[in-house]
Image: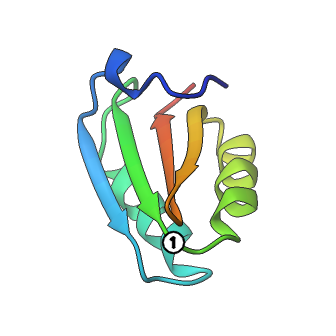
């Protein structure tokens, strides 16, 4: 997992989950990724501190790749590639 390299990824979709709490960021992420093609990249924005643990676990469980995770000013940003 790399930090601070968002500009190097082509983001196909952005999911704004700010203001949502567990389990909603993961529920919305699951739905969004289901609609994407393998290899596409989604950027997720969340404010729930528990999202860090949840997104990492979800990626491991589903076989999607967490390319980047960062936090700035209370907003967590995740870059995920569908299908590894």
Residue 7 higher or lower than 55, as above or below: above
Quarter of the image with the C terminus is top right
Tell me which residue sits at (47%, 38%) in the image. Answer: 79
Tell me which residue sits at (67%, 25%) in the image. Answer: 1
- Residue at label 1? 47
Closer to us: 53 or 30? 53
Where does the image place residue 83, in percent across and percent down from the top left? 52, 30
Residue that protrudes farthest toward the left in the picture:
12
Where does the image place residue 54, in percent across and percent down from the top left? 70, 62
Tell me which residue sits at (34%, 57%) in the image. Answer: 32
Type of colouring: rainbow
Closer to us: 76 or 81? 76
Left or right, residue 24 beside residue 14: right
Left or right, residue 66 beside residue 77: right
* Mark 1 crowd level (few <14, some 14–19, many ≥20, 10 Å Cα): many
Residue that protrudes farthest toward the front in the picture:
73
Where does the image place residue 75, in percent across and percent down from the top left? 48, 62
Where does the image place residue 10, in percent across and percent down from the top left? 27, 23
């Amino acid at each position: 997992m790399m930090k601070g390299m968002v500009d190097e990824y082509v983001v196909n979709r952005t999911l704004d989950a700010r203001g949502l709490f567990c389990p909603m960021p993961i529920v919305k992420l699951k739905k969004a990724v289901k609609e994407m093609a393998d290899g596409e990249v989604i950027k997720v924005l969340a404010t729930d501190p528990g999202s860090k643990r949840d997104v990492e676990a979800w990626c491991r469980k589903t076989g999607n790749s967490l390319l980047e995770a960062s936090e700035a000013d209370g907003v967590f940003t995740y870059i995920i590639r569908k299908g590894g």
